Amino acid sequence: MKNLAFASAAILAAAALPAHAAGISDDVVKIGILNDQSGVYADFGGTWSYEAALMAVEDFGGTVLGKPVEVITADHQNKPDVAANIARQWYDEENVDTIMELTTSSVALAVQGISKEKKKINMVTGAATTELTGAQCSPYGFHWAYDTHALAVGTGGALVEQGGDSWYFLTADYAFGYSLEEQTSKFLKSSGGTVLGAVRHPLASTDYSSFLLQAQASGAKVIGLANAGLDTANSIKQASEFGIVAGGQRLAALLFTLAEVHGLGSEAAQGLTLTEGFYWNRDDESREFGKRYFERTGRMPNMVHAGTYSTVTHYLKSIEKAGTDETEAVADAIRSMPVDDVFGRGGTVAANGRMIHDMYLLEAKAPADVSEPWDYFKVLATIPGDQAYIKPSESGCPLVSQ
């Protein structure tokens, strides 16, 4: 009878416990920033995203629920197998609570799969594929900053409206490039445009001449660059050598950010139309953030850097709200809280993990119009989040009720 009474008391005590254990496991919150720090996307994200994460932690006060917050980083070299090995080591041996940034779509999909298996949160700012919140969505996976659909709606839509209704694609030969070409093609066709063809190039190629000559020979009004980072910058430079723009065709940089425009120079970039989720010189709040970021890095942030600041901030706020760093509780809090920071003002997180926020259609200024360093863009339009992103019910994510 005594044993029975003890067992009954234990059951009652267990039933009285909250659904999620309170507090911080291991007495520290550990965030991993995993991205390309030595390849074609080193400026696009790189160590600059790590600095944005550190800045977010400092702005939050350095602790959450009374425990310290630590940020570590590594270079995945744009290789899914390298990224997967790092992710497993971080989760299994180094007690990392969440992995963020994840430049390169193939890498992000691989790490999201591991995070789902390990029941750990991942928050993507550097990768573009809509598969992250589509067929390969995860209850613990979140996608911030932008995706291929938002880029297609922004840049593709703007150029079709301006008469650029026939396209040929120069596409990076991996998941990101395919997704960007597919999303832009769908949007073009739905808007009355036509796609005359496409050619694919290896990641980090150095010679785009044969690809550009095929695009030039197509006669398309617009050559869509479905690539990013140095691939896009080098494509633009070599297109200039072939006189493609001088010959009357337009270049559409479908994923090009402030960092790459700075590297390319305003002379070469002038007139490019592009889409970002953040621009430092848009208003007083973004300017204040940009100048603080510049003081620590010597450069202004693009949407990946500002987006990483936002993911870290929202993650820490969600731990604070949940009262624990337990994965299920924090994931619930991430979805239930509005995103309220310099990047994602008025943002919401949908059931499929997509953070829905406004995007900005930008045009690179001519050198004579650049009034101060890094003042490379004029804002042509704001694209509301509900127009920029695929409706969650149409995303193909099994987590979303149809």
Image: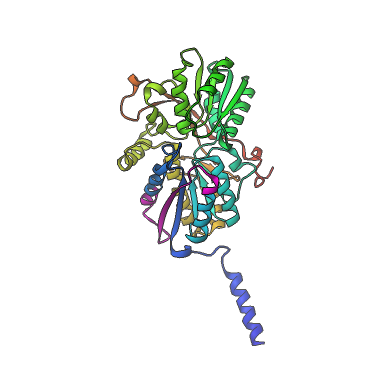
> What residue do we see at 36% from left, 51% from top?
58
Q: Position of residue 218 (x, y in %)?
A: 59, 16
When asked about the image quadrant of residue 161, the answer is top right
Q: Residue furthest top?
A: 247
Is residue 349 in view from this perspective? no
Image quarter for residue 143? top right
> Observer-nearest residue: 388 or 240?
240
Q: How many marks?
A: 0
Residue 246 point in image, percent of width and height? 46, 13
On the picture, is 92 further left or further right than 137? Answer: left
Query: Quadrant location of the C terminus?
Result: top right
Left or right of residue 151, residue 373 in this image:
left
Q: Which residues are magenta?
A: 56-82
Outermost residue toward the bottom? Answer: 1
Magenta run includes residue 77: yes
Q: Which residue sits furthest right? A: 402
**Residue 327, can we see it?**
yes
Residue 71 spot, x, y in % from top left: 41, 53
Query: Is 132 part of what is drawn in magenta?
Result: no
Query: In the image, is residue 264 above or below residue 97?
Result: above
- Position of residue 172 relative to residue 120, above or below, is above
> In the rendered view of the protein, which quadrant contains the N terminus?
bottom right
Work out whether residue 42 or residue 382 is closer to the camera in this orientation and state it.
42
Q: Position of residue 13 (x, y in %)?
A: 59, 74
- Its colouring scheme is rainbow
Is 286 above or below relative to 398?
above
Residue lying at 41% horizontally and 21% vertically, measured from the top left? 270
